[in-house]
Image (cartoon, helix red, strand yellow):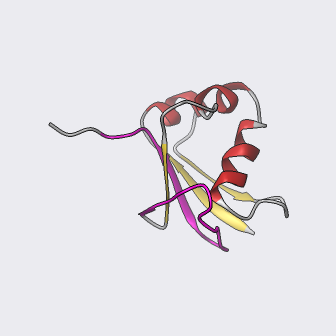
Amino acid sequence: MKIRLLYFARFREAFGCAEEEIDLPTHVHVVGDLTHWLRNRGGAYAIELAEGRAYRVAVDQEMAAAQTRLHENAEVAVFPPVTGG
């Protein structure tokens, strides 16, 4: 399954890109699988997406939970939590 990953704010800086298209391994079906797989890339991915770090994920511009299913050509955004004032 191919998806488009978008990285915002500190993630764009840490990962060195704003977006990428990837073919997911066959075992990645939900957002939690994806973040685990990304962490296993190591380096900045392991640091920025570590358990306990604050970040949000959206699938097709809708906030997503760990069990949100992914689908072919999904747009998946990773971004820091946003606070308002």
**Measuring 64% from the left and 31% from the top, which residue is drawn there?**
50
* Outermost residue toward the left in this view: 85
Q: Decide which of 83, 5 is in the foreground and name it.
A: 83
Above/below status of 4 relative to 83: below
Report the magenta stretch's main SS. loop
Above/below status of 64 relative to 54: below
**Measuring 42% from the left and 35% from the top, which residue is drawn there?**
9
Q: Is residue 39 magenta?
A: no
Find the magenta span and give its range.
Answer: 62-82
Using the rendered view, name the quadrant where residue 52 is placed: top right
Q: Decide which of 68, 48 is in the foreground and name it.
A: 68
Above/below status of 60 relative to 14: below
Q: Position of residue 29 (x, y in %)?
A: 73, 65
Q: Position of residue 48 (x, y in %)?
A: 59, 30
Q: Is residue 63 magenta?
A: yes
Looking at the rendered image, the quarter that the N terminus falls into is bottom right
Q: Position of residue 71 (x, y in %)?
A: 65, 73
**Measuring 63% from the left and 32% from the top, which residue is drawn there?**
51
Q: Is residue 37 left or right of residue 15?
A: right
